[in-house]
Image (tube, rainbow, N blue to C red):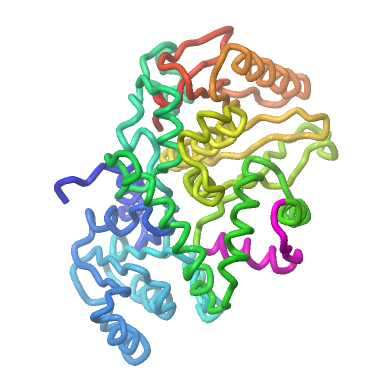
Amino acid sequence: MANYLKRIADDILAFKLSAMGAVLVEGAKWCGKTTTCEQQAKSILYMADPQTRAQNLKRAELDVYSLLSGAKPRLIDEWQDAPQLWDAIRFVVDHSDEDVGQYILTGSSVPPQADTISHTGTGRFARIKMRPMSLWESGESSGAISLSELFAGTSARSAQGMDHSLADLAFMTCRGGWPQAIGRKGERALITAKEYLEGVVESDLSRVDGVVRNPDRVRRLMRSCARLQGTQSNLSAIRKDIQANDLKSLDEDTIQSYVAALKRIFVIEDLPAWTPELRTKGSIRTTDTRYFVDPSIAAAAMGVGPGDLGNDIRTFGFFFEAMAIRDLRVYMDALRGHVERYHDKTGLECDAVLHLDDGRYALVEIKLGGETLIGEGIGTLNKLDGLIRSKGMRPPEFKMVLTGIGSFAYEEDGIMICPLSALKQ
């Protein structure tokens, strides 16, 4: 594809294909899974193609192996429509002389018939979770500061990011990282997230498991989740928010089922809590933090646009944090790491803890910008670092305040002050 924008997942997919027989690529609709996988596939089966869908589903029932023939690696797009493909691919990989790089599967939801799959795929399948594009992938970050180099201790300590105004940041937040919106301007870019929300509300959430859900209820729930993003809100808190802001309410069982369904189609992706060995585990909160997979979903759910965020800096700060978390997750995937959040009962919290598999980690505070907020972030990082060192734990490899406003990255008293527009994996 001539206009294809390189994704961080490209290299992850190539690596996993070189090591495993099959790779499952999951993620929200429209995040670019199929297009990314098409770049490396030698043959393709589109299960959702309306011209061949019925035929392919029947073939999956009668002769599933006939769907697997083709040049390798063979891409099976939206495999969850015929869950029996999973066991068939596992069997083929298990009994083939070609032990790596045979199949790529993409999926926009966890299949409702997952219990019919007899084998987990352990040892045969690798997994990749794709998300909407980070600012580095969309060409809106200079990439002058590299997380991998910071972990290695070789990164520059000052660098130029891209010069984005507050209005630019608000636009990028509401537009989101949807590939088809990148490069568009104005309402033509913003409509993608709005239409994504409508698809989830009107059909996707009911189709995922065949349970008919009231679109109005889905919309109210997503609006409340948007208002509570970045918080460790439980089901009771969501229910109270709905009661406070709408005439109708939902019981907690209904809320739980809706949230679970939203996770199955990769719309909600909560951030796990970091529970370090501080010998004071009773004081550490273990509740996950609420986030959508992309901040534009929250903006669409709340009906806010770039102008609204520009006029409400406090709310903008929560939305910017969500965009930064999205980007950090994408970057840490490239490093085979993950992102968590620290919060204890004293009120001390750290927005993002970046973990590598070898035990190294970093502490990151996310602030929209401004001297006061950056100073608060520095204070939080130093306080948590002091607590960690006092307990004899391994110290962080680096500490960072990740900002929105500002285009220059620099170091202050051992802490990186880095705009999101300068960061990459």
Residue at the outermost top position: 413
x 70%, y 57%: residue? 246
The spot of residue 355 in percent (x, y) is: 56, 36
Is 261 inside the magenta-drawn segment? yes
Image coordinates of residue 278 in percent, x first then y, are 77, 32
Q: Residue at x 60, y 26 (%)?
A: 365
Q: Is residue 128 above or below residue 329?
A: below
With 377 as the anchor, is 182 left or right in this view?
left
Write down the quadrant of residue 155 in the picture.
Answer: top left
- In this view, the residue in front, 150 or 197, is 197
Q: Which residue shows up at 50% across the image and 72% down it?
A: 208
* Range of magenta residues: 245-264
Question: Residue shown at 59%/73% (left/top)?
Answer: 213
The answer to whether residue 43 is above or below residue 424 is below
- Residue 338: x and y in percent read 54, 41
Residue farthest front in this picture: 247
